[in-house]
Image (cartoon, grey):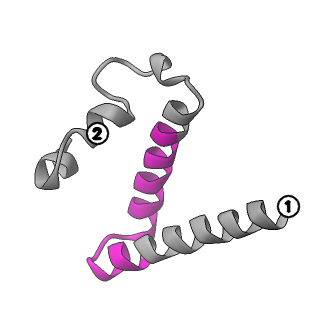
Amino acid sequence: MSPMTDNLTRDIVAKLWNLCHILRDDGVTYNEYVTELTFLLFLKMMQETGREHRIPNGYGWAALGRREGLDQLEY
């Protein structure tokens, strides 16, 4: 692994742990936030790899990104 890739990986891991701490502090359990973050990573990776067409219309990363605030959370 190159130093640049290693730094990027560390940055992503740090950001995920920061999100986990925020969710935990808000009363979200480990099981709940792991499930949610895994789903979000899945949606983002499908979009990044050009495979979002495999997800039903209206349920991909772009559809989620068009929403804001509580609407996004409920979606």
Most extreme residue toward the right is 1
Q: Secondary structure at mark 1?
A: loop
Q: Residue at x 28, y 42 (%)?
A: 65
The N terminus lies in which quarter of the figure? bottom right
| Above or below 72: residue 26 | below
Q: Residue at x 68, y 64 (%)?
A: 9
| Above or below 21: residue 71 | above
Between 57 and 50, the one nearer to me in the picture: 50
Q: Residues within 10 Å of mark 2 (few under 14, many from 20)?
A: some
Q: Residue at x 42, y 79 (%)?
A: 21
Span of residues in magenta: 21-44
Q: Which mark, residue 52?
A: none
For badge 1, the amino acid type reads Ser
Location of mark 2 (residue): 64
Q: Is residue 25 magenta?
A: yes
* Prevailing secondary structure of the magenta residues: helix
